[in-house]
Image: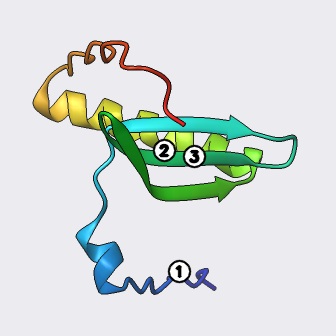
Amino acid sequence: MAEAKKTLNIKMNDDELKGSYSNLLRVTHTREEFILDFINAVPPQAIVTARIVTSPGHLKRIVRALAENLERYEKAHGTIVEAAPPADEGEVN
């Protein structure tokens, strides 16, 4: 008997569908979780546009998925030149 394919219906509200811009990422962690703060920084201030809290094991899967998709992108569209780090504009608080 063939194994039934599982599907997951994902719902997204209008605000999430629009997305949020981020040009800065702050990563912190405890033993139990990683906290990813996606930030829109426009000096002299910055605002967190999204916060993701996840387990270390799931973060490892996220990193792998990002790396695999980056590799596919570069195979299809060419190598991405890494952006230079931003000029030192002070610490984000």
The spot of residue 29 in percent (x, y) is 74, 39
Sooner in the amino-acid sequence: mark 1 or mark 3: 1
Name the residue carrying label 3: 36
Name the residue carrying label 1: 5
Residue name at image x 66 percent, y 56 percent: 53
Q: Amino acid at mark 3?
A: Leu
The nearer-to-camera label among 1 and 3 is: 3
The spot of residue 52 in percent (x, y) is 58, 57
The spot of residue 27 in percent (x, y) is 60, 36
Q: Neighbour class for label 3 at 10 Å: few (<14), some, many (≥20)? A: some
Q: Is residue 54 left or right of residue 12?
A: right
Q: Secondary structure at mark 3?
A: strand
Q: Amino acid at mark 1?
A: Lys
Q: Secondary structure at mark 2?
A: helix
Distance from the alpha carbon under mark 1 to that under mark 2: 21 Å
Q: Is residue 54 left or right of residue 41?
A: right
Name the residue carrying label 2: 65
The nearer-to-camera label among 3 and 2 is: 3
Q: Dividing the picture into quarters, in which one does residue 13 lie?
A: bottom left
Compared to residue 39, the image places residue 49 above or below, namely below
Q: Quarter of the image containing the N terminus?
A: bottom right
